[in-house]
Image (spheres, rainbow, N blue to C red):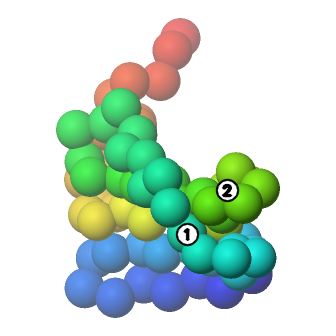
Amino acid sequence: MSISLSENTLHIRFTHPKTRETDVEPLPLTTPTFLFRDEKTGEITAIEIINIKEALKELNTTKTE
């Protein structure tokens, strides 16, 4: 696993794809957040959050009581 934070963009790599990454899937958040999947297995290989500060604010305001 590798984690990088650069210019407020958080990228977490869980595993490397066996072939290549496809099906970049946006998550249902206002803040741009994407899941990356292995083309062959469909396994999630990484997540990227474009504005981590805004994502944390958004997640904090949407938590259930």
Point out residue 9 in the picture as x, y percentages from the top left corner.
33, 75
Within-10-Å neighbours for mark 1: few <14, some 14–19, many 20+: many
Examine the rendered structure and indicate whether residue 44 appears above or below residue 25: below
Of residues 11 and 64, the one nearer the viewer is 11
Secondary structure beneath dot 2 equals strand
Q: Compare marks 2 and 1 and give the one earlier in the sequence.
A: 1
Of residues 4 and 14, the one nearer the viewer is 14
> In the rendered view, does 32 fall on the left or right side of 16?
left
**Residue, disc 2:** 44
Point out residue 58 in the picture as x, y percentages from the top left corner.
31, 38
Give the residue type at disc 2.
Ile
**Residue, disc 1:** 21
Give the residue type at disc 1.
Glu
Secondary structure beneath dot 1 equals strand
Examine the rendered structure and indicate whether residue 24 appears above or below residue 5: above
Question: Residue at image x 28%, y 76%?
Answer: 8
**In front: mark 2 or mark 1?**
1
> In the rendered view, does 60 fall on the left or right side of 38?
left
Image quadrant for the N terminus?
Answer: bottom right
Question: Residue at image x 38%, y 62%?
Answer: 49
Confirm whether residue 10 shows in the render.
yes
Question: Residue at image x 66%, y 86%?
Answer: 2
Of residues 46 and 55, the one nearer the viewer is 46
